[in-house]
Image (cartoon, helix red, strand yellow):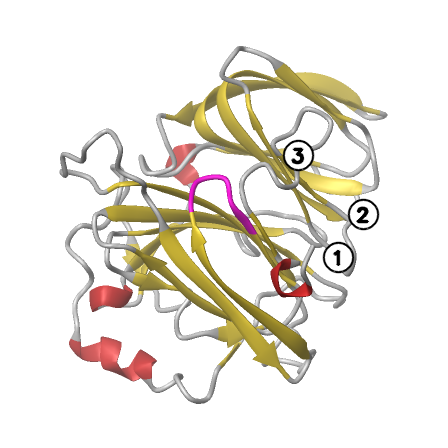
C-alpha cells in the first residue's frame, strides 16, 4: 500500500475472519485502539475471544444479542439497537477485559476495543441514558452521542462516541490534534474514524445516488501524515497523530462517524489542541444558532461546544 494511503481504508479493505473491517495491533504503527465491523444481515453471529482488551458493542443498524462469559460469571444482554445510525442513539454494552462473547442478530454492528489490564464492571448504557450534545453552531453544528466517554462510562483506556453531521455541515472542526502529553492541556490518543453516509432526511434521491462526505488529516510536529479522502459507508480512517478535520457532509447527504480513542497516558481523558491557524473560528459560533435540523432522534440535546 502506498504510504500516502496507509491511514485510510475503503470498505472491505481491512476484512478478516468474517469481519468486514478489523483494526488492531497487527497494523503497522498501530497499538492502542481497535475496531471490528460486521454485517449480521443474514442472522449470523460473530465471536469475541477473551483477551486483554476492553470492548464496547455498538449496534449500527438493527438489534443484537450479546452472550458473554468470564471468570466472574456469564449472561446475556439484548441490545434493542436502532433502524440506522441516523435514528438517534443506541443502547450499548461495555465488556470488561478477559470477557468472551458471541454476538448474534440482524443488522450491522461495531465493536470498539482497547488493550487494557484493569477490570471494570460490565455496563449496559440504555439509549435513553446516552448523553446527547449539540456542538458548534451554524454550518459547524453536529450531534454527539457520548455513551463511552469519561464521565459517562467507567473504563481504563477506551473512549468512544459517535457524531452525526447534517448535510452541508462541517464537524471535527477546527482541525485539532491529541498527539502530545501536555498536562491539563493535551492528551495522547490514537483515533479511529468509522464512517457512514446516507441521503439527507426529507430528500427524495434517485436510486443511483452515491452518499459521501470528505475527511482530512495533516501533519503536526508529532509526525507527517496526509489524508484527504472521499468517505462512504464502511470506510475507516486511522489517526495515529497529526491534525485531523474537517469531516464534511456533502450537500444532499448526512454523515456519521464512530470515534474510537485510547492512548498511552495514565489518565483517561480527551484533551485537544486546535490548529492555531483556525482556532479563532470557535468564537464565531457565539453569534450563531444551532442548526434547526438537529437533533436527530427523539432525544433532547444540550449544547456544548467541542470539535
Magenta region, residue range: 232-236
Q: Position of residue 199 (x, y in %)?
A: 25, 39
Q: Which mark is residue 15?
A: 3
Count every numbered label the image shows and give the total: 3
Q: Nearer the viewer, residue 189 or 70?
A: 189
Q: Residue at x 26, y 37 (%)?
A: 209
Q: Which mark is residue 30?
A: 1
Q: Assign the magenta stretch its main secondary structure.
A: loop
Q: Please, which residue is most extreme toward the front here?
A: 2
Residue assigned mark 2: 26
**Could you classify mark 1 by the number of other residues whose Cα lies within 10 Å: few (under 14), some (14-19), or many (20 or more)?**
some
Q: Nearer the viewer, residue 251 or 34?
A: 251
Q: Residue at x 53, y 69 (%)?
A: 217
Q: Position of residue 191 (x, y in %)?
A: 61, 58
Q: Position of residue 251 (x, y in %)?
A: 22, 54
- Secondary element at image label 3: loop
* Mark closest to the chain's N terminus, 3 or 1: 3
Marks 3 and 2 close (CB-CB < 8 Å): no
* Quadrant position of the C terminus in the picture: bottom left
Marks 1 and 2 close (CB-CB < 8 Å): yes
When asked about the image quadrant of residue 68, the answer is top right
User: Can you tell which of label 3 and label 1 is closer to the viewer?
Assistant: 3
- Secondary element at image label 2: loop
Amino acid at each position: 500500500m502506498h504510504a500516502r494511503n496507509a491511514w485510510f481504508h475503503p470498505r472491505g479493505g481491512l476484512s478478516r475472519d468474517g469481519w468486514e473491517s478489523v483494526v488492531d495491533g497487527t497494523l503497522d504503527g498501530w497499538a492502542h485502539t481497535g475496531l471490528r465491523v460486521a454485517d449480521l444481515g443474514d442472522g449470523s453471529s460473530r465471536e469475541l475471544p477473551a483477551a486483554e482488551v476492553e470492548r464496547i458493542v455498538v449496534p449500527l443498524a438493527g438489534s443484537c444479542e450479546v452472550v458473554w462469559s468470564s471468570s466472574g460469571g456469564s449472561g446475556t444482554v439484548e441490545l434493542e439497537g436502532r433502524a440506522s445510525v441516523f435514528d438517534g442513539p443506541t443502547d450499548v454494552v461495555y465488556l470488561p477485559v478477559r470477557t468472551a462473547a458471541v454476538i448474534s442478530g440482524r443488522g450491522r454492528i461495531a465493536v470498539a476495543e482497547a488493550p487494557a489490564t484493569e477490570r471494570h464492571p460490565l455496563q449496559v448504557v440504555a439509549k435513553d441514558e446516552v448523553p446527547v450534545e449539540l456542538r458548534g453552531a451554524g454550518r459547524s453544528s453536529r450531534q454527539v452521542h457520548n455513551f463511552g466517554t469519561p464521565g459517562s462510562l467507567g473504563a481504563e483506556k477506551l473512549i468512544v462516541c459517535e457524531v452525526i453531521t447534517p448535510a452541508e455541515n462541517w464537524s471535527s472542526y477546527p482541525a485539532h490534534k491529541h498527539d502530545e502529553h501536555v498536562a491539563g492541556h493535551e492528551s495522547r490518543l490514537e483515533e479511529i474514524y468509522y464512517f457512514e453516509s446516507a441521503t439527507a432526511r426529507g430528500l427524495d434521491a434517485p436510486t443511483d445516488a452515491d452518499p459521501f462526505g470528505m475527511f482530512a488529516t495533516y501533519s503536526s510536529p508529532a509526525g507527517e501524515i496526509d489524508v484527504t479522502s472521499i468517505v462512504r459507508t464502511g470506510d475507516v480512517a486511522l489517526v495515529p497523530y497529526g491534525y485531523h478535520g474537517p469531516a464534511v457532509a456533502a450537500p444532499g447527504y448526512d454523515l456519521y462517524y464512530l470515534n474510537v480513542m485510547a492512548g498511552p497516558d495514565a489518565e483517561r481523558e480527551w484533551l485537544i489542541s486546535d490548529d492555531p491557524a483556525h482556532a479563532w473560528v470557535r468564537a464565531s459560533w457565539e453569534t450563531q444558532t444551532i442548526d434547526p435540523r438537529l437533533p436527530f432522534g427523539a432525544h433532547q440535546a444540550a449544547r456544548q461546544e467541542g470539535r
